[in-house]
Image (cartoon, rainbow, N blue to C red):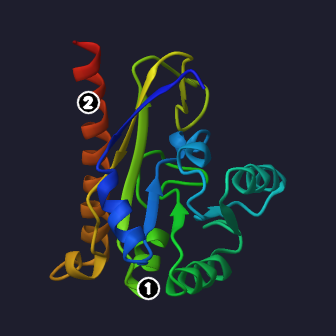
Amino acid sequence: MTFRRVDIGRETVDSLHREQKPWIYGTWHCNVLFTPYFMRNQNVYALVSDSKDGEMITRVLYRFGNKAIRGSSSKGGMKALRQMITTLKKGQPIGVTPDGPRGPALIVKEGIIQASRLSGAPIIPFFYAATKQWNVEKSWDRHIIPKPFSTVVVSFGEPIDVKKLSQNKNGEQLMQEVQKLFLENMEHCYSKIRDIQNR
């Protein structure tokens, strides 16, 4: 409740919502902790690990007006992918951590690209950072925790049309291009943070 929030690019998601079109939020694993709060009441179906830890995260998602699809690349992957595609084709947005559940950090894996390609839904890169924050050094993803009374910048990237982007690219080239767009959105967020800090 002490945060000041600044959004970048939110109008893209608002437009998709008004048009009742689905989309896929892609959020780095280092953003997992506060993403359910920043996406609250959007009825997003987030991909959550089918584990005991995932059960706790599922309860948090429901608390903030969202839902869960259980599974991951390491457990129940194909079942989860089918659920994601079904959810998107029903017009509901989903959320995926493209470098989850175990990393490497900031490296896009195939699942989010497959979900977009098979459903036709665009990927929206999503990233937050704060003017004052902790980074959990001992975690593989260096998890970001905004400090109280900080300004949090939430950046929504431009929609990624995977079908269009995949023209004349093999699978590896496509993943690298999507990863580049995710990293550009992250840098856009940090650029805004620097602007705020320099005022």
Tag on residue 119?
1
Residue at 25%, 39% (x, y): give it.
188
Q: Where residue 26 sits: x, y (%)?
A: 44, 58
Tag on residue 30?
none
Specify whether 43 is left or right of 53.
left
Residue 167 found in image quarter: bottom left
Residue sticking out furthest to the front: 18
Residue 157 against residue 199 in the figure, above or below: below
Specify whether 157 is left or right of 86.
left
Residue 10 against residue 48 in the figure, above or below: above
Residue placed most toward the observer, 7 or 80: 7
Quadrant the C terminus occupies: top left
Residue placed most toward the observer, 119 or 1: 1
Image depth: mark 2 or mark 1 in front: 2
Q: Where residue 45 sits: x, y (%)?
A: 61, 67
Amino acid on which the number 1 mark rests in the picture: Ser
Residue placed most toward the observer, 83 or 14: 14
Q: Where residue 29 sits: x, y (%)?
A: 53, 46
Total numbered labels: 2
Few, some or many C-alpha atoms within 10 Å of disc 1 (few <14, some 14-19, many ≥20)?
A: some
Quadrant the N terminus occupies: top right
Residue at 37%, 55% (x, y): give it.
125
Few, some or many C-alpha atoms within 10 Å of disc 2 (few <14, some 14-19, many ≥20)?
A: many
Q: Where residue 106 sits: x, y (%)?
A: 41, 47
Residue at 43%, 38% (x, y): give it.
128
Tag on residue 192?
2
Residue sticking out furthest to the right: 52
Alpha-carbon distance for marks 2 and 1? 32 Å
Which element is circle 2 on? helix
